[in-house]
Image (cartoon, grey):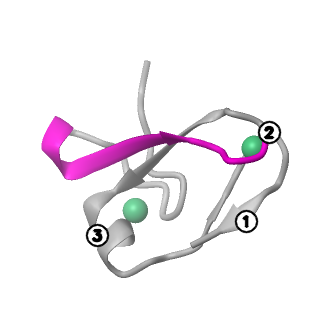
């Protein structure tokens, strides 16, 4: 299954280039690339529309 950054939609290629975490609202798995994490780009959960930095 393809993994994509929740924030910018880039496909995740290398494991050490992204972080996987759970949505604080619904525990849906969210993925963010290192670039978005370091620049604190907002993400939006696809399940519950929760938005966070
Ligand atoms: Zn990203
Ligand atoms: Zn959620």
Instruction: Please give the residue where the numbered disc 2 appears in the rendered image.
Output: 47
Instruction: Please give the residue where the numbered disc 3 appears in the rendered image.
Output: 35
Q: Is residue 53 above or below residue 25?
A: below
Instruction: State the CA–CA distance, disc 2 to disc 1.
Output: 11 Å
As drawn, the label of residue 2 is none
The mark that comes first in sequence, 1 or 3, is 3
Query: Residue 36, image x and y in percent?
Result: 38, 69
The quarter of the picture where the C terminus appears is: bottom right
Disc 2, ligand 2: is the CB inside 8 Å? Answer: yes
Q: At 48% across and 64% down in the image, what residue appears?
A: 8
Determine the residue located farthest toward the top in the rendered image. 1
As drawn, the label of residue 51 is 1
The quarter of the picture where the N terminus appears is: top left
Picture mark count: 3
Per the rendered image, the range of residues in magenta is 14-25
Q: At 84% across and 45% down in the image, what residue appears?
A: 48
Q: What secondary structure is found at the residue carrying circle 3? A: helix
Question: Disc 2 vs disc 1: Cβ atoms closer than 8 Å?
Answer: no
Q: What secondary structure is found at the residue carrying circle 2? A: loop
Q: Is residue 2 above or below residue 17?
A: above
């Amino acid at each position: 299954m393809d993994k994509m950054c929740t924030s910018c939609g880039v496909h995740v290629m290398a494991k050490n280039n992204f972080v996987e975490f759970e949505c604080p609202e619904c525990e849906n798995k969210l993925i963010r690339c290192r670039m978005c994490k370091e620049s604190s780009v907002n993400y939006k959960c696809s399940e519950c529309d929760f938005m966070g930095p």
